[in-house]
Image (cartoon, rainbow, N blue to C red):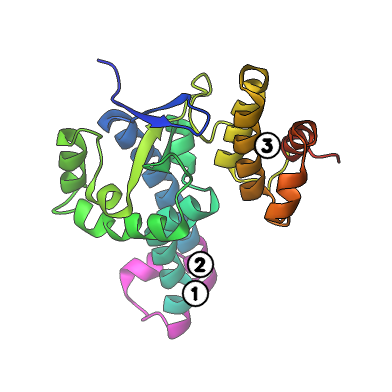
Amino acid sequence: MAAPQVILQSITGVDVELRIAGVGSRSFAFVIDWHIRAVLAFTWWAIGSLVSLGDIATFFAGEEAPGPGYFLWVLLPTAGIYLFYHPILEVLMRGSTPGKRMAGVRIVTRTGDIPSMGALLIRNVFRLIDSLPFAYLVGLATALFTEQHVRFGDIAAGTLLILDSKEHDTSFARLTPPNRSLDPRAADLIHELLERWTALDEKTRGEIGRSLLARADRSMSPEQLAQLSTVELRTRLQTLLNPTP
C-alpha cells in the first residue's frame, strides 16, 4: 500500500509532495534512537561509577552510600542523556536524529518547513502522554489510526514525520545549499524558480524572484529590489545558491 501523501502548493505553481512515514518507519527510527541513547547513558554511568566508586559492583552492593558528587556528576547526567536525547538532537539536527536518518525519515511542519525550536520542544513534551501506559502504546495507537500517522506530540506541535529517501527529491528541504545561512525551503524555491525561469513570463518571474530575494536577503530595501532588472535578479538568486568562496 502506498504511503499517504500531503500535497503542498509552492509559489511557482508546482505541487510539492510529502510522503508520510508510517508506523513501521516511525518505530524503526525510535528503536535505533533508543539503543543509541541507552548506550550513551549506560557508558556515562559506568565510567562515572568506576571513577567515583572504584567499581560498578559497589553501587549495587550498597555497602557504601554514594556521596553528593556521585549523584551530581554521574546519575544526573545519565538521566539527562536519556531524557533529553531527542529534544536536543532534534533541535541541533533540524528535525532529525541519528535514528531518523538511518530510517530515512525526518520531522517537518505541515507547510513543509523545518520545525522551530518551540515546535520540537512541544513535540517532545507530549512524549509523556504518547509513552503511556508503557512502551509508547498511546503514541503507536494514534499513529496507527490517524490518517497522517501522527502521535499526540505531532498534533500539538503541528508537525509530520515524512519519508526522506535520497531518491525522493520533491520535498521542500531537498537542497543543502553551499550557502549554509540560506533557509532550506527558500533555497528549494529559488532552485525551482531558476529551473523554470525561461518558461515563466517576465512579470511573473520578476514578482516571484523579488519575493524570494526579499526573504533570503533582508539587507535589501523594497526600493533596491524594485530597481533590479530580471537579469540582475536572476544573477543574485544564482549567487545565493552558489556563493563565491
Compare residues 221 and 50 and report the one nearer the observer: 221
Q: Residues within 10 Å of mark 3 (few under 14, many from 20)?
A: some
Q: What element does badge 3 sit on?
A: loop
Q: Is residue 2 above or below residue 123?
A: above
Q: Looking at the picture, which amino acid does disc 1 mark?
A: Trp
Label 1 or label 3, whichever comes before in sequence order: 1
Residue drawn at point x = 30 percent, y = 36 percent: 27
Looking at the image, do the residues carrying marks 1 and 3 touch, with CB atoms under 8 Å apart?
no
Q: CA distance from mark 2 to mark 1?
A: 7 Å
Residue under label 2, please give it: 48
Magenta region, residue range: 47-69
Residue 115, x across and y down, in percent: 45, 50
Residue 15, x across and y down, in percent: 43, 25
Residue under label 3, please give it: 177
Kindly report which numbered mark, 2 or 1, lies closer to the viewer in this rendering.
1
Taken as a whole, is the magenta stretch helix, strand or loop? helix
Q: What element does badge 1 sit on?
A: helix
Label 3 or label 2, whichever comes before in sequence order: 2
